[in-house]
């Protein structure tokens, strides 16, 4: 067995591991099921890539994001490491070839989307593979207590029957203690083994600014803080509005959301990464897997609907260890907007059935068929075709996904791919009989040495140039060769993919687990209240975030807006005692939410009361209950 540090030096050029990486790697190499909690930028991928290279066999990596899988495979191949990925949008024959190559030992890492693991094809091939490790990225997706639950993740543990001696490495950047426990249970850990790096970011200053003129104050932030930044907003329309506002005021800015084409997203992301654009204005579609350590400021113009989401997004600032700022702009109306949003995210059964019926019609899928089949899915066209409102329809799709009826993948551009399947004698005979095909095949064999073993990504214009023919002619040659059984040709396409995870049923027979539905709704409400409480409570921002993730006794950070006193004046002892006494009286009969306590005081006292509540929480004189209510500890 190769040594981990030797592998790190050989392929990555580093002489030392980052904190906890070495311990995690040795844990899985020792055969232990392991859960690794590392913050954004903590180097999670190294934790499974290095042990995969230390031993014979292939590491299967379960990941929910197509774009991240493709980036990982590309980067590994650049380092000379054999890797491949299987995800929605690939044809059955492509999937079959990649799985078969994995069985033959062609790869060291095989990335698979969770829904692909459910197929009989996947299970049969995995049974034949020499698997050395099963890595589960974004492991919080397995927990219904978490903020990003995905039902296909629940099937991962079934692989343990096929791979009884193979350890599991689960990885995530954000998980509450409840979710940490749930991950281990759902993945059937043999014994608990958790490595957790503190979520504390000593260089990152968190601030909540109570401002109605958000755009003007945002501009002030970027004028005061040099360097690149990110602005998170809640809608695609707002990305355009804010980016234009920044540009008009002399700040170079670009916008990013999931509705852009693959080329547009790539071009804008590269411009920002290479500092040709200073600020990226985006929805939460931006940031996952992007390695830019020198972001100096992350601004949220609206309150996210969970502290997990906020922590991940804000944490993209200052990953180089230098001073950085996470600024959240907040007004009381934001809280009501979030509460409305969480209610709208759980639509009535009638709408869910209507959307499901429309999906079957849109995909032209018969009742009783379709399990495991994927289709190109244009959300806006779908809504327009069946006269469905965008937001409620999106909520219905998410619920159908959470119930395991469908899987909606992120949009990904799949380049054109070719795989020569004919034996060499048959291929030679075909070349002799077809002069144009002869030139194309020669170029393919020269430019893509692996085209006989696997699908390779091609560019038709480039291939046409070297074959000295128009691109349209090249496509005709490839299509004809496919009909003749010489090769497989998959033209380029870009679309969100919708997969029916189960056979289609008649809409009236669609079932939703009401108990789970209500559980998810109540958990979403709890997460929203936690986010609101973070913004409302004048208590060290870092301590609040760390306590949410289970680090109860963290020290005050000294650099957030509360610690530095920008949002308040100091209370003297008499004021504190007076407010504390009344808070105790207000809570004498029953626990109350933060805003309910404030209602017992005059509006002009709210800031001082908020500060008092922060002190009482810090000193553990108040106890925070599930659902966000506070109780005086006797």
Image (cartoon, rainbow, N blue to C red):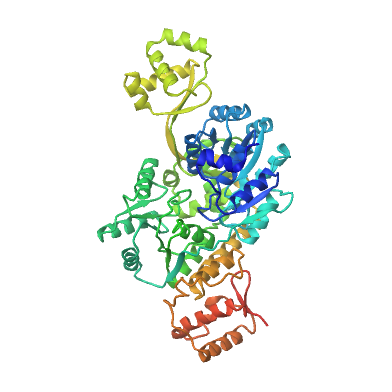
The answer to which quarter of the image holds residue 296 is bottom left
The answer to which quarter of the image holds residue 86 is top right
Task: Describe residue 223's horizontal placement relative to residue 366 as left or right.
Answer: left
Near-viewer residue (445 or 91): 445
The answer to which quarter of the image holds residue 507 is top right
Total marks placed: 0
Task: Describe residue 444's horizontal placement relative to residue 502 as left or right.
Answer: left
| Residue at the far bottom in the pictured view | 574
Return the x and y of residue 496 as percentages of the image width and height.
47, 41
Return the x and y of residue 454 as percentages of the image width and height.
52, 26
- Can see residue 360? no
Vertical arrangement, residue 358 with respect to residue 341, above or below? above
- Can see residue 151? yes
Vertical arrangement, residue 128 with respect to residue 511, above or below? above
Return the x and y of residue 53 as percentages of the image width and height.
60, 37
Near-viewer residue (509 or 143): 143
Q: Quadrant of the C terminus?
A: bottom right
Near-viewer residue (326 or 29): 29
| Residue depicted at x 60% and y 62% | 523
| Residue depicted at x 44% and y 39% | 495
| Residue depicted at x 55% and y 40% | 499
Q: Quadrant of the N terminus?
A: top right
Vertical arrangement, residue 57 with respect to residue 63, above or below? above
Return the x and y of residue 122 as percentages of the image width and height.
63, 34
């Amino acid at each position: 067995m190769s040594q981990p540090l030797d592998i790190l030096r050989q392929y990555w050029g580093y002489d030392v591991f980052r904190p906890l990486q070495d311990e995690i790697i040795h844990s899985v190499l020792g055969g232990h099921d392991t859960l690794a909690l590392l913050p954004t930028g903590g180097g999670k991928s190294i934790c499974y890539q290095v042990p995969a290279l230390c031993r014979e066999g292939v590491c299967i990596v379960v990941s929910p994001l197509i774009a991240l899988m493709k980036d990982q495979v590309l980067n590994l191949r650049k380092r000379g490491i054999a890797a491949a990925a299987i995800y929605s949008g690939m044809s059955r024959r492509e999937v079959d070839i990649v799985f078969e190559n994995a069985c033959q030992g062609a790869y060291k890492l095989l990335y698979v989307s969770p829904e692909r693991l459910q197929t009989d094809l996947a299970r049969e091939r995995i049974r034949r593979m020499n698997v050395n490790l099963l890595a589960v990225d974004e492991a919080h997706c397995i927990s219904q207590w978490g903020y990003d639950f995905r039902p296909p993740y629940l099937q991962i543990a079934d692989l343990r029957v096929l791979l009884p001696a193979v350890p599991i490495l689960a990885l995530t950047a954000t998980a509450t203690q409840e979710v940490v426990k749930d991950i281990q249970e759902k993945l059937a850990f043999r014994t608990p083994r958790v490595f957790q790096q503190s979520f504390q970011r000593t260089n990152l200053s968190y601030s909540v600014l109570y401002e109605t003129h958000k755009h003007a104050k945002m501009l002030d932030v970027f004028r005061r803080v040099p360097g690149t930044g990110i602005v998170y907003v809640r809608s695609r329309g707002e990305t355009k509005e804010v980016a234009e506002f920044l540009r008009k005021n002399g700040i170079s800015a670009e916008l990013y959301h999931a509705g852009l084409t693959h080329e547009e997203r790539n071009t804008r992301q590269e411009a920002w990464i290479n500092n040709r654009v200073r600020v990226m204005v985006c929805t939460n579609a931006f940031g996952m897997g992007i390695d830019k350590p020198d972001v100096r400021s992350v601004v949220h113009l609206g309150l996210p609907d969970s502290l997990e989401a906020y922590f991940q997004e804000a944490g993209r600032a200052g990953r180089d260890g230098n001073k950085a700022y996470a600024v959240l702009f907040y007004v009381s109306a934001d809280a009501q907007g979030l509460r409305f949003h969480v209610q709208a995210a759980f639509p009535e059964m009638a709408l869910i059935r209507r959307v499901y019926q429309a999906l079957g019609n849109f995909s032209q899928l018969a009742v009783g068929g379709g399990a495991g089949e994927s289709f190109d899915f244009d959300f806006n066209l779908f809504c327009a075709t069946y006269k469905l409102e965008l937001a409620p329809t999106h909520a219905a799709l998410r619920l159908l996904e959470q119930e395991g009826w469908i899987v909606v993948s992120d949009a990904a551009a799949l380049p054109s791919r070719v795989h020569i399947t004919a034996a060499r004698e048959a291929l030679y005979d075909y070349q002799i009989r077809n002069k144009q095909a002869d030139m194309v095949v020669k170029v393919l064999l020269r430019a893509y040495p692996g085209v006989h073993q696997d699908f390779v990504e091609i560019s038709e214009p480039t291939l046409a140039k070297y074959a000295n023919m128009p691109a349209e002619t090249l496509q005709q040659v490839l299509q004809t060769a496919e009909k003749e059984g010489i090769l497989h040709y998959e033209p380029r396409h870009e679309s969100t993919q919708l997969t029916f995870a189960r056979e289609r049923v008649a809409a009236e027979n669609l079932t939703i687990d009401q108990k789970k539905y209500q559980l998810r709704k109540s958990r979403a409400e709890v997460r929203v209240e936690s986010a609101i409480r973070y913004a409302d409570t004048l208590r060290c921002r870092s301590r609040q975030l760390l306590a949410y993730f289970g680090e109860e006794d963290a020290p005050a950070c000294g650099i957030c807006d509360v610690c530095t006193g920008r949002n308040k004046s100091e209370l003297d002892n008499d004021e504190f005692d007076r407010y504390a006494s009344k808070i105790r009286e207000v809570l004498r009969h029953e626990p109350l939410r933060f805003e309910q306590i404030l209602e017992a005081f005059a509006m002009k006292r709210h800031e001082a009361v908020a500060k008092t509540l922060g002190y009482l929480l810090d000193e553990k004189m108040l106890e925070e209950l599930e659902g966000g209510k506070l109780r005086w500890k006797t």
